[in-house]
Amino acid sequence: MDSPAANAAFAKQINVKFPLLSDMNKKMMKDYGILKGYDVQNETYQWAQRANIVIDKNGIIQHIEEGDSAVDPNTAMSVCTDLHKKQAAK
Amino acid sequence: MKRVLAACLVFAMAPALPSALAQNQKPDVAKLSLKVGDAAPDFTLLSDQWKTVKLSDYHGKKNVFLAIYVLAFTGG
């Protein structure tokens, strides 16, 4: 689990302009169903699986990628671009 | 691009995940329980500035791109 302090250091390092968020109580991960259990040497540990999710202005999910495909953000980025164009056209 | 993305949130969480461990993923643990078209559950999370950020803060204002990362410090 990365703490807000660790994220702050990382944000500074890579100079991001968007918030880096920490799910310290794992509530969001549970609500979204992305908290997974992994068996390591007879113990089960839980952490999030990788995912990209695009949510529109109305709070509706428009795009989901899970696992390895979520490593590449380009598909989700193009979904954002299309979404923005559609909204601008209205 | 800034306007297009509006809000891009990265979750940095959990310990480093050696790729070999992914093989041990328990099949009984849920796949993402949401699907396209569903209302996204609201959440409240702590930002790197120690401020709370809610999904509902962006409602009616911006589209949100959630990128969920396991340990953002690593290349994996």
Image: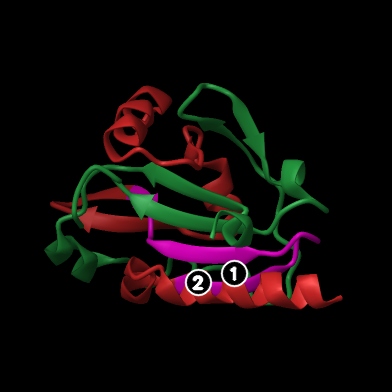
Chain colours: A red, B green
Q: Position of residue B4 (x, y in %)?
A: 61, 62
Above/below status of A5 relative to A18? above
In this picture, residue A5 sits left or right of residue B53: left
Q: Which residues are magenta?
A: A46-65
Which image quarter is the C terminus of chain B in?
bottom left
Q: Secondary structure at mark 1?
A: helix
Q: Quadrant of residue B1?
A: bottom right
Residue B43 at least partly seen: yes
Crowding around mark 2 (Cα neighbors within 10 Å: few <14, some 14 to 19, many 20+) is many
* Amino acid type of the residue that numbered disc 2 sits on in the rendered structure: Ala
| Tag of residue A76 | 2
Task: Write the residue at 62% across / 53% down.
Answer: B6
Foreground residue, A41 or B40?
B40
Q: Is residue B11 magenta?
A: no
Above/below status of A77 relative to A30? below
Outermost residue to the right? A90
Foreground residue, A34 or B44?
B44
